[in-house]
Image (spheres, rainbow, N blue to C red):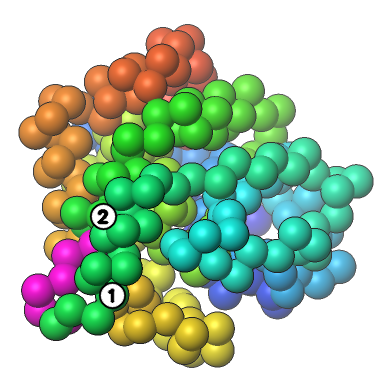
Amino acid sequence: MEYVRLPLEGGANARDFGGYPTEDNKVTKFHVFVRSSRLTDLTDKDNEFLKEYGITDIIDLRGKSLIQSNFVSDDNINREYFNFHYIPLSTNKIENYIKENEYVDEEEFNFGIGYTYLLDNKVKIKEIFDVIANANGGVLFHCTAGKDRTGVISALILGLCNVERKDIIANYEVTHTYMSDSEFMNEYTLNMQISKPQFMDTFIQYILDIYGSFENYLLSCNISKDNLEKIKNKLCD
């Protein structure tokens, strides 16, 4: 069975990448990539569901710093089912950006600027994409809310596969809807909770202005063309 939002008891923001039309007349496949919020509350039933759904690899993008708070090393992941990869994604520039801007007026705040700083961490981006390319089955990747670090990686994958810009933005912005009633989100300022379309639009425009395409950026991370082709072939018919 195919799902857009996966019916997990302990994962409010787990979503499949399937069903998006691409600019080269393909459609993204289900059961290949799943983005999610933290997996702290996964149940045994959830673990079994993900296994049966085809997930073989899980990537945790969190760490112990400001943007990567709520790190829980003992997430309820069945390590017998899944290959687990801990690849914390951050930079000092985005840490400083958050500290300086988390309380600014909401109308002036544009987290898309902060997202561009994550692109500087090309070593971790390469590590993430190499795992994605070489996984034997579906890959689930997550951070805390499944919004920022997860949103950046999601946009890079969808952009690489020529998913339309408006769909990349839509894929990002729905996080606020799914996470708005999650208690742990109240630990963050409003600026850290929202996922406005303009944030992702700013991020996409930066990539296009500086690199010309998503693929050019990923190549600048020293990800091989072969691995990028593997990812395209995995996701698109």
Helix, strand or loop at mark 2: helix
Q: Give the alpha-carbon distance from disc 1 to disc 2, as whole Å.
A: 11 Å
119 and 200: which is toward the camera? 119
x and y, in percent, of residue 37 in the image: 55, 65
Query: Residue placed at 71% from the left, 51% from the top?
Result: 53
| The N terminus lies in quadrant | bottom right
- Quarter occupied by residue 62: bottom right
Could you tell whether 70 is left or right of 53 in the image? left
Disc assigned to residue 44:
none
The amino acid type, in three-letter code, at marker 2 is Gly
> Relative to residue 196, is residue 140 depicted above or below?
above
186 and 55: which is toward the camera? 186
Residue denoted by label 2: 114
Q: Earlier in the sequence, mark 1 or mark 2?
A: 1
Helix, strand or loop at mark 1: loop
Is residue 171 at all visible to an observer of this figure? Answer: no
Residue denoted by label 1: 102
| The C terminus lies in quadrant | top left
Q: Main structural element of the magenta stretch: helix, strand or loop?
A: loop
Is residue 80 at all visible to an observer of this figure? Answer: yes
The amino acid type, in three-letter code, at marker 1 is Glu
Q: Which residues are magenta?
A: 106-111
Query: Residue placed at 25% from the left, 45% from the top?
Result: 116
Around disc 2, counting alpha carbons within 10 Å, would you say few (fewer than 14), some (14 to 19), or many (20 or more)?
Answer: many
21 and 123: which is toward the camera? 123
- As for residue 237 lying within the magenta part, the answer is no
x and y, in percent, of residue 107 in the image: 10, 79
10 and 21: which is toward the camera? 10
x and y, in percent, of residue 4 in the image: 49, 61
